[in-house]
Image: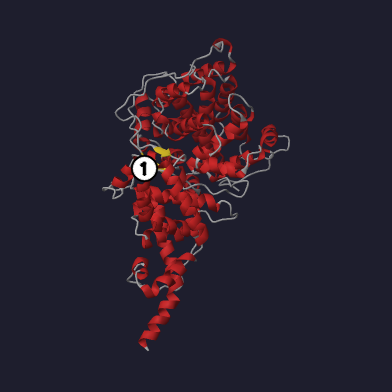
Amino acid sequence: MGFVREVELDASFAPAAACRDYFGYLPAVFRAQSLLPHLIEAEVGLAAAILFEESALSRRQKERTLLVLAAAEGSTSCATTHYEMLRVLGEAEDQIDRVVSDCRHSEMPPAEVDLLEFALKVCLNGASVSRADIVELHRRGWRDEVILETVLVAAWARFESCISAGIGASPDFPPIPLPPPAAFLAQPAGDGQTIEPGPYLRLPDLGAEGFAPFAVLREQLGFVPNVFRAQGDRPKVIEAEVSAMRLLLFAEEQLTRVQKEQILLVVSAAHSNVYFVAVHSEILATLGVARDAADRIAKDYRQAGLSDADVALLDFAHKLADQRSAFGLQDIARLRAHGHSDEQILEAIAVTALTTFLNTVQFGVGAAPDFEPRVALQRGPAKIANLFGPPNGPTEGGLSTDPDAAVIAKVQNGDADAFEDLIARHSRRVYRTLLGILGNQEEARDAMQDTFVKAFQHIGAFQGRSRFSTWLTSIASNTGLQLSRDRRPMQSLDEGLADEDEGFRPRQIRAWTEDPEQLYSRTETRALVEESVMKLPPKYRVVLMLRDIEQLSIEETAAALGLGIPALKSRHLRGRLMLREALTPHFAASAKGGAA
């Protein structure tokens, strides 16, 4: 069940039949929208045009791309669907696992890995895509048709991730564990640089006067936006996009047209999409909204004089578009409290997802502006996922001099023997990280060797954005998680609501003046503390080992495990409470013995 109520769909509902032909079943993400069947019709139409048919990319290539992008966005539901689809298409599980965890060491050809890296950039950092990216793909032998197909698949990945998060769809299969998010803060996309205007791809002649979707756009908008002309190699996709707009945007089913255009404007501004901010400002003007009012909405809709209900609606869409990992049932409840019905909420989710889709397409194809932009948008830090090698992004608080820098330089200059020094310095920390994840000494020792092999293979790409120890610990974390996938079921180390709903409540805790590291330092209690730590659930065990035993900083531990700082602090506190409760009987007995 999702966040809103469901109804039974008619057995003859055509989009459900199309899903069953492709997936073999009707995915939960569509069933959860059964209150508004026209939403399912629009979405399945898009999926059919982009995914269901083999065109420039094969079905396997599309599903691999979708799996990696879903993992990068942290969408367990979507990743699980595409994992199962690859299994149905005959892909071996170990190969699928390698694609997710370390694509460069899968069996994919290098050129396909390059294409997948481009898809990741379009998906997670679209505002930084430039003509240079397309020129590089051309140099590597990829044609415009393939590049456009990759952009469309990336846009669909963002669409389905947004829909899935918005409706709270449960996975249709036992969820697969995802690698810790290898996201890091980069320089703000576009700061200090000018992205050369497009279009980046050739513009086939569609016979625009007689092309039916363009006639619909002229009727509804008064013009044909260039973002659609830039997709001329895929006329069926343009048809599906315009059909989706007709069903989700042009018809006033639940929300008004102005409310929908305001969502489109605010979400485009959140994505730093100057093209669509200009488009939707103009469209709002044709709907009777003054241009300066539209500009205020784009800059700060909370200060634009809108009603409380409309501000709540835009808060909802903005969070779903830009802070998806923090989105949940509480956001649905907040909209209900402002008088919005489940049907209106569903429509808002679909319009937000459609905006995300169109923004992503525009970033990838570089559509030339239709209007001169009136609002200057400030681009925020880009979120980039690095699933192809060990992440080495910066941590909070800046970096001091890395004590391993001199040794790393030797290794990178060809002194392979110097790597032995790095092994000697960091083997204990790597081992304890793996022991925290795997809970088995033999497996941890084997995985430690794999970790150092991977680090040696990738050290040429290490750029010192983080300490070497943090970078190495993140490799160990990914290696341990990869190994743990062979154990089904397992407890995920990933960030999620499970941390908040664990069901653990401390019952008997003495007030301690010492933390686990201080206790651990005493020889007589070390074995007891370590034994108790090993009995904790893996996601708490590994945090305590890194923070309290190995003494990593909060920032280093968060970076190594791919967690946000707040989630890491929450998990650390909960782990300490669990450990204290486990040790309380022992120390209570010791205190009584001492008093006697």
**Farthest-out residue, bottom:** 596
Percent position of residue 307, x then y:
41, 38
Q: Give me the residue at 35% from left, 56% from top.
A: 552
Q: Give me the residue at 31% from left, 49% from top.
A: 404
Nearest the eye: 60 or 328? 60
Q: Note whether 490 is above or below 28 in the view shown.
A: below
**Farthest-out residue, left:** 401
| Mark 1, residue position | 393
Percent position of residue 362, x then y:
46, 25
Hey, what amino acid is under mark 1?
Answer: Gly
Nearest the eye: 461 or 539? 461
Residue 493 seen anywhere in this rendered image of the structure: no
Residue 451 seen anywhere in this rendered image of the structure: yes
Q: Note whether 530 is above or below 184 in the view shown.
A: below
Q: Give me the residue at 38% from left, 28% from top.
A: 294
Nearest the eye: 306 or 302? 302
Percent position of residue 77, x then y:
56, 44
Query: In the picture provided, is 305 more to the left or to the right than 42?
Result: left
Please tell me in which quadrant of the rendered image residue 297 appears. Answer: top left
Query: In the picture provided, is 440 more to the left or to the right than 555?
Result: right
* Secondary structure of the residue carrying numbered label 1: loop
Total numbered circles: 1
The scheme the figure's colours follow is secondary structure
Q: Quadrant of the C terminus?
A: bottom left
Nearest the eye: 513 or 218? 513
Report crowding for label 1: few under 14, some 14 to 19, many 20 or more residues within 10 A (C-alpha). Answer: many
Query: In the picture provided, is 119 more to the left or to the right than 246?
Result: left
Percent position of residue 555, x then y:
34, 51
